[in-house]
Image (cartoon, rainbow, N blue to C red):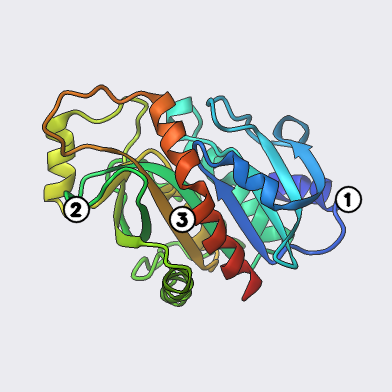
Amino acid sequence: MMNKIAEATAYIKKQINGEPVAGVVLGSGLGNFAHEIKVEKEIKYEDIPHFPVSTVEGHSGKLLYGELSGKKIVAMAGRFHYYEGYHPHDVVFPIRVMKYLGIKNLFLSNAAGGTNPAFKVGDLMIINDHISFFTPNPLIGKNEKELGTRFPDMTEPYSHSLIAKAKAIAAAANIDVKEGVYVSVTGPTFETKAEYRFVNTMGADAVGMSTVQETIAAVHMGLPVFAVSVITDLGLREENNIITHEEVLQAAKEAEPKLAHIFKEMIAQL
């Protein structure tokens, strides 16, 4: 594992100029955020040693290095999911590589189904905690001491200080943000009505198919995490509307400018 991380990191470092201060992962339908970055180098995942390749529509499959808000960042235009058939170690491999590229903070975004009755499509939910029981933990297996401790504490998986900054930025821009708990499931099926009710009953406000494994890997390495879900569909609904991936992508696209503003202002303050 450490040799693979070293090889991927070395390959990328040869092509970039300077150490990124932040890493950004763009979720489903949020790829247009990449246009906010003054891109200096674009690297296809398939060209990076040991990197998986994104297979999902709405995930372009490129690592972007450049400038955002006057700061050097590295961004994943497309992430990897357990449901694509990847091992959890593969899902979190890019997060580990970004840490070794030098990032000091990790920003995650995703499209999620809302299970909180107060939510509506297009809402932004700052993730303040998560439930990870339904997806395999990426730390299962031999622990690499260079990455972190065998039993990392998960009391604060999402940085309280970063959350406070985001809420202040949103308030100043009159952007309505929610806050809540995200539960990760394997996918790729969307949830049944009973599953949505179960997720809500257990105390989660949104459900999705990503983010949690990445967060666990980041916390394991001592990397502060900030994450936002774009609520792209509502699970607790009366009518029998069918949820489609195309609708999820469209809802994420419409909410993207608000998310972009928050990310840009937060990175400017790093």
What is the crowding at mark 3: few (fewer than 14 residues within 10 Å), some, or many (at least 20)? Answer: many
Give the mark nearest the N terminus, 1 or 2.
1
Q: Give above or below for 47 relative to 177.
A: above
- Residue at 63% over, 32% down: 60
Residue 235 horizontal/vertical position (percent): 21, 37
Is residue 94 visible in this depiction of the protein? yes
Distance from Cα at disc 1 to Cα at disc 2: 48 Å
Q: Give the residue number, with chain letter if any, for mark 2.
A: 118
Pick the front one: 196 or 99: 196
The image's mark for residue 14 is 1
Q: Amino acid at mark 3?
A: Thr
Q: Is residue 163 left or right of residue 23?
A: left
Circle on res. 209: none
- Could you tell me how many numbered marks the image carries? 3
Sequence-earlier tag: 3 or 1:
1
The residue singled out by tag 3 in the image is 215
